[in-house]
Amino acid sequence: MSESPELTSEVEQAARAVFGDRLALAERYVEHLATSGIERGLIGPREVPRLWDRHVLNCAVVAELIDDGVHLADVGSGAGLPGLCLALARPDLQITLIEPLERRVIWLEEVIADLGLSGVRVLRMRAEQAVSEVDAQVVTARAVSALDKLAALTIPLLHGKGQVLAIKGRSAQEEIDKAQKVLRKFKVSQTEILTAGAEVLTAPTTVVRIRVGGSLPVG
């Protein structure tokens, strides 16, 4: 069994800035990732040393792009990246985790119960099936698929108004270019590349924001 990675002083400073008085809960979440998350195949063992900076904080800083008190849907939640990270950073949000694989859903529900995250629910289904169950103002996704396919999975969950926040890497602009046909089909009002966490992370998170219906975003 792997051990939870220790917080270095630099990472701890960033984690305190992001999670505040919920840092202890975030540490428990990381412990779940480093133990049962690996045992059940949700996280690779080589990821343990970088769970904080590459995964948890990389996801949690996206919270700065989200309005207060909105309903957020996280597509392909897997190990809770970014959905549970955002739930920990932003207890004001109502969050629906959408995950089709049973073993991942069971793990997510166990972690949610242990951390006492009352504003979070899990739906075991594919994103396409969740459209009738979810009416979100924000949809998030990380490492699900390329943007052309991801747009078709996420935009319908907004029901005509809101924003998709897709965590991406260096290929973000290339993915946007390839997704133009799909974006036009869904009548996207704006697509842009943003960075999150620039004030607390040495490597800020790259986010593709897709706006639908002219909603006014934060940031």
Image (cartoon, helix red, strand yellow):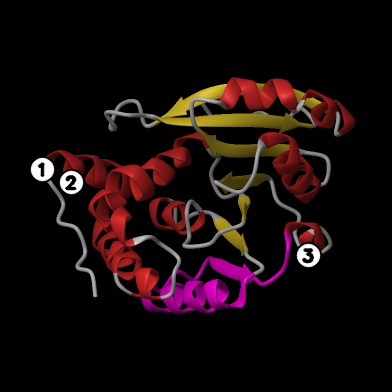
Q: Residue at x 37, y 32 (%)?
A: 197
Q: Is residue 50 left or right of residue 127?
A: left
Which image quadrant is residue 74 in?
Answer: bottom right
Circle 2 is placed at which residue position? 12
Of the image marks 2 and 3, the number of the one nearer the N terminus: 2
Q: Residue at x 37, y 29 (%)?
A: 204
Kind of residue sitting beneath label 3 = Glu
Vertical placement of 172 versus 27: above or below?
above
Q: Within 10 angstroms of label 3, few (less than 14), some, or many (20 or more) residues?
A: few
Q: Residue 82: say if magenta.
A: no
Position of the N terminus by quadrant: bottom left
Label 2 to label 1, Cα distance in Å?
5 Å
Kind of residue sitting beneath label 2 = Glu
Vertical placement of 19 versus 103: above or below?
above
Circle 3 is placed at which residue position? 133
Circle 1 is placed at which residue position? 9
Kind of residue sitting beneath label 1 = Ser
Q: Is residue 10 left or right of residue 52?
A: left
Q: Is residue 217 visible?
A: no
Q: Is residue 105 left or right of residue 51?
A: right
Q: Kindly identify which numbered label has been placed on residue 116.
A: none
Residue 121: image x %, image y %? 59, 69
Q: Nearer the viewer, residue 116 or 60?
A: 60
Residue 109: image x %, image y %? 51, 76
Residue 216: image x %, image y %? 66, 28
Q: Is residue 57 left or right of residue 101?
A: left
Q: Secondary structure at mark 2?
A: helix
Say if mark 2 contacts mark 1, CB within 8 Å.
Answer: yes
The stretch in magenta equals 101-126
Counting labels gives: 3
Label 2 to label 3, Cα distance in Å?
38 Å
Q: Residue at x 71, y 30 (%)?
A: 211
